Amino acid sequence: MPEIKYYIVDTETTGLRVGWHEITQISIIRCSDRKQLNRYIKAHHPKRVNPIALEKTGRVYSDLFKGDGRKEVVEFCNNFFAEDGANPEERCIVGHNIIKFDKGFLHELWSGEGFEFPACLWLDTMLYIGAWKKKKGLTTRKSNLNWSLEALGITPRPGGHNAVVDTQNNYILWDKLKKEGLPAVPHMKRFAHKLSPEDDD
């Protein structure tokens, strides 16, 4: 079986609705060498921003006009992924609430620029920490990123709700859970991204 290539990914968006709101920041850490990529993306629909999203990320409305174009960022990320020489079935995207939140936005961004997202495997560290809690007999429903790190005796790096910091904290969490002896593969999910006929037009 080919070795799985792990990537920590986090996004910041203009709100919670895929297809209406959009990604304005993406950060990726390649776990094999801990090289980190970070890009801000110019908003296509800045007026759709949820003010709460701006407040949480510590940005202002004018910041939505800063950054690179969507296609430029997608191509830059694709080149970054391609450096590992792997195919999408051999890549696993790791993130906190990645499956319910970021995955949809990532697929939407890549589809919008005519590309399939280059990874099929997904590992949500909210599920991963859930397995650790079960192992430890903990019944708390808490599972956010900061709580998860603190539960493992790690002080989170300050500056959350910025994709750079959140990916760094998530890398530390993922690495620590591995060292705790928790296998990751049973908690992975497969979501292959395929372009629809409309996307090909």
Image (cartoon, rainbow, N blue to C red):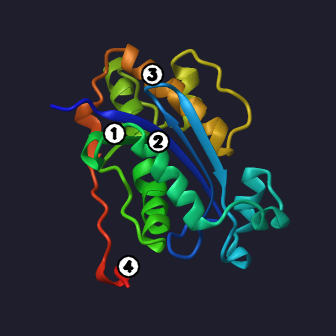
Chain-order first, disc 2 or disc 3: 2
Q: Residue at x 80, y 56 (%)?
A: 59
**Label 1 neighbour load within 10 Å: few <14, some 14-19, many 20+:** few
Along the viewing direction, whichever of 163 and 49 lies nearer the viewer? 163
Q: Secondary structure at mark 1?
A: loop
Whether 31 is drawn above or below 98: the answer is above
In the rendered image, which quarter is residue 84 located in? top left
**Label 3 neighbour load within 10 Å: few <14, some 14-19, many 20+:** few
> Which dot, 3 or 1, sits closer to the camera?
1
The answer to whether residue 169 is left or right of residue 116 is: right
Residue wearing tag 4: 199
Chain-order first, disc 3 or disc 4: 3
Chain-order first, disc 4 or disc 1: 1
Whether 190 is drawn above or below 154: the answer is below
**Label 2 neighbour load within 10 Å: few <14, some 14-19, many 20+:** many
Q: Residue at x 38, y 85 (%)?
A: 201
Q: Tag 4: residue type?
A: Asp
Q: Quadrant of the N terminus?
A: top left
Q: In the rendered structure, are the residues bearing label 4 and label 1 in contact, judged by CB atoms less than 8 Å apart?
A: no
| Mark 3 and mark 4: Cα distance apart in space | 36 Å
In the rendered image, which quarter is residue 15 located in? bottom right
| Mark 2 and mark 3: Cα distance apart in space | 12 Å
**Residue 85 marker:** 1
User: Residue 168, image x and y in percent?
Assistant: 59, 31
Residue wearing tag 2: 95
| Mark 3 and mark 1: Cα distance apart in space | 23 Å
Residue wearing tag 3: 175
> Which dot, 3 or 4, sits closer to the camera?
4
